[in-house]
Structure formats: C-alpha cells, structure tokens
Amino acid sequence: MRYELFYWPSIPGRGEFVRLALEQAGADYVDVARGSEADGLGVPALTRLLADESIATPPYAPPFLKAGKRIIAQTANILLYLGARHDLAPRGEAGRLWAHQLQLTVTDFLVHVHDTHHPIAGALYYEEQKPEARRRAAAFRKDRLPKFLHYFERVLRCNPHGSRYMVGNKLTYVDLSMFHLMAGLHYAFPRALAQLKPELPLLDALSRRVAALPRIAAYLKSKRRLAFNPHGIFRHYPELDAPAARKAARK
Amino acid sequence: MRYELFYWPSIPGRGEFVRLALEQAGADYVDVARGSEADGLGVPALTRLLADESIATPPYAPPFLKAGKRIIAQTANILLYLGARHDLAPRGEAGRLWAHQLQLTVTDFLVHVHDTHHPIAGALYYEEQKPEARRRAAAFRKDRLPKFLHYFERVLRCNPHGSRYMVGNKLTYVDLSMFHLMAGLHYAFPRALAQLKPELPLLDALSRRVAALPRIAAYLKSKRRLAFNPHGIFRHYPELDAPAARKAARK
C-alpha cells in the first residue's frame, strides 16, 4: 500500500515527524501537496480533501495520512498508527501508550515553540506581534524550554532498559521525533540550546545516533527533506534567542 | 481495581475530561490531590510522584492516572486507555483512532482557550499580560473559536450513523468532552457563544443529552464536580468576551 501524506509543501512543520517515521520504515509514500497539480496532487488536492463534506472522518488540519480508505489526522495519532505497523513502537499496550504519551508531550512542546513567534494569532504575521513575541520567547527560554528538555533527558536517564532509546531497548518514532526537535531548536534557538546542551548529554547523543541511521542519513541528504525556514514552527529570529536561564538560577 | 486520578485540586482543568469518563463508566476512583494529607493524599502525593526519579514512565504534568502499577499521562492518552476498558470508545482500531483524533483536536482547542488569558506565560498572572490577552482573545473569537466549533458541528453532521454522537452510533468519551467544552465556553465566553450557538444546533443538542445522562447528571449535582472558576482553563473575564465574528463576516 502506498501511503499518501498530506501536509503543507514549503515547511517541515508537523508533517516532518510523520515523514521521519515513513522514511525510517522504508514505507512507500507520496508527499501529496509537494506533487504536481497536473498529476492531481499539489496543495489543491490537500484543500479539496479538507473541504470534502462526504468524508465521515474529516481532519481538522494537516498533517493527515491516507492509508487505503482510511484518513488519519493528528501527528501523534498518525505515529500511533504507523508505529504499530512498522515496528516503530513497542508491541505491548503499556509500552505503546508510554511512547504515545511522550509523543503527545512533544506535541505540547511544539505549541510552545510555535507560539514564541506567534503569541497572538496564527492568522497574523510575525511582524504584527513582535513585542509580544519577545516577551513570550523570553519566558519560553527561561521556563518551558529547559523544563521540557530536562524532562526528555530524564526519560532517557530513567529508562530501565538503558539510555540509548526513549522507550525500551529499541528505536521508536519517539526517538526520531527527539532528533527533529533538537535539530529544530538548534536552528531556531542556537544560543539558548548551546547553553543548555551540557545538561542534555543523553538527548544530544540520541540525536546524533538517529541522524546517523542509514535511512535517516540518506533522507537528510535527499531533496525530500525540507530545510528549516522562516515560515515553519522552528524559526530563527535572533531577537527571540538568547542564552537560556542558567541552571543555578532556576529553582 | 481502584483508579487513582492525579490532578490539581482546585480547578476542573484537563482533569475534568478524565473525571467525566470515570463517572460515566461508574469506575471506582480516588481524586488523589483532593484527598486529605493525613491519608497520604492531597497535593503532596501528586508532587511527590512527579519528582520521583524511580519511576520509569514519569508524567510531564498532571493529569495522570494510576491504574494498578501503570502510570498514564496526557488527557487524551488516558481516555484512549479508559475508553477501551469501559466501553466508551469503538471496539475496532479505525473507530478508536478516529475518536482519539477528535480528542486530540479538543486538546488543541483547549490550548487556544487557555492562551486567551495567558498568551505570554503560564508562570505569570493574568494581570501581568492583560493587553496581550485582549489581543489574543479578540483573534480567538474571530478565528479559532468559530473554526473549531464549526468543525465539531460538521463532525456530527457528517457522521454516517446519525448526528446523535460524535463517533458511530454510541456514546464515547468524545461526547463527554464536547459537553464539557461547551459548558466551559458558556462560562468563559457567554457573549461569543450566544452569537455562535444558532450555528451549532447538533453540538448544543449533544451537550444537553450528555448533561441528562443519569450518571453525569448525578455527578454534576455532586461535590465531586468542581465549579468553573478564575484559576482554570476556562475563565470568565468580561473584557475578553464579546460577540464572535458573524458568519457573513468570515470567509
């Protein structure tokens, strides 16, 4: 079966977490909105499906995945589905819920990252909410950024199967997501991340291992991988970056 | 098995979505942080567990559920677990993912609701971010509020099994969540919701049916139900409320 992934064509965004899982699985998929309109693909194919009232299970927003007749939306939900099919999640229910719980925590974190540059409204440009963005980004660097990253580091440290993987003793989609999260933060908040990195040795090592996985390494070099840019979730605005709060200064 | 629900004791918050499922299931549970410290309960029991580094699957934040030896966090993930056990979700995988997808969309919506009064940082008081809150709330009333509610209404309208339930032809945890969402909006944004309500007849009818379910009705009258108040996700600040954008004014 050829999967059809629907996501905006010009940013890695939330779609990237799904792409990484599809790539590591070696799955056959088409990135619909990046295809040609002449082939019935492109953004119109995406917006058509979003507006189609004949669909019994309509997505609220991209990304969504067509798998045969099924349409599955919400990044973490898509990964829950793919993880079970492509050996990218534990087999048992407890492990599967744990991996999913971590992915949902990634989802929460992404909202905080996004809202550093869009604290007022997604419908407005960054330039229309710059003072608010400065304030929100400062609070993010001081509080949420270290709190989430230390949490993920703790998950690796407390994994009873060792600190090579987020879940159990095998690669899961959560590891792929952690890699992308770290890559995105490195792009968007280089100064804040540089300051925090010494406190995140396990997360840093995990990111490097994921980047070196043969399929992921090949993907990262391919044209299928979209570069971070000033339109996505992870954006580099120097005025929003600064060293994170130092550990001693945090409670 | 007696479930242990861990959530902040003074607000309905995200914990309420779990409480409603437990109540409708007739499940045996203890609301840990609302218990007495003399019994080993109360907020210290919650914070102790959050800080316990011996836990292999630590939650990032409340709510979380202890079910025997398992600890499950993330509201939608808890409902995924409970739905399967208490007949509050479809039996098949496709239906289960669809219900979960809707719940994750509720999760997304709740962040938007919360951030109307906390657009800069959760660590600051509302009073420290009032101008930003006014701007964010105006954008919310114009864009996200109608978009999410019309989406949920559409889900009911497009349900091939009829418009009584969000998923299939039986009550699921998603219906319970829709009830609470509507109740919360009614409390927080009475003027905006009053304006939108005529466009949401199915959602309104569903909310009323859920409120009248015998177990839910009994729960709502009990002391176990916490009232909405100015500390939770749904807060009523008159300055953040106003009629929503009218349908004709929207694209």
Image: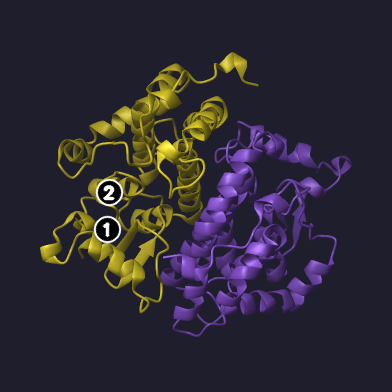
Chain colours: A purple, B yellow
Q: Secondary structure at mark 2?
A: helix
For mark 2, does the 10 Å Cα neighbourhood hold few (<14), some (14 to 19), or many (20 or more) residues? many
Q: State yes or no: discs 2 and 1 in contact (Cβ < 8 Å).
A: yes
Q: Secondary structure at mark 1?
A: strand
Which residue is the site of mark 2? B19
The answer to whether residue B57 is above or below residue B198 is below
Q: Is residue A206 left or right of residue A1?
A: left
Residue B86, image x and y in percent?
30, 54
Task: Indicate the amino acid at tag 2.
Answer: Arg
- Distance from the alpha carbon under mark 2 to that under mark 1: 8 Å
Is residue A57 at least partly visible in the picture? Answer: yes
Which residue is the site of mark 1? B5
Q: Is residue A55 left or right of residue B109?
A: right
Q: Residue at x 23, y 47 (%)?
A: B23
Question: Which of A231/B153 is in front?
Answer: A231
Residue A189, image x and y in percent?
67, 59
Question: Which of B236/A14 is in front?
Answer: B236
- Quadrant of the snapshot with the N terminus of chain A: bottom right
Q: Considering only order in the chain, which callout, 1 or 2, is on the residue closer to the N terminus?
A: 1
Task: Indicate the amino acid at tag 1.
Answer: Leu
Can marks 2 and 1 be said to lie on one chain?
yes
Q: Residue at x 58, y 62 (%)?
A: A244
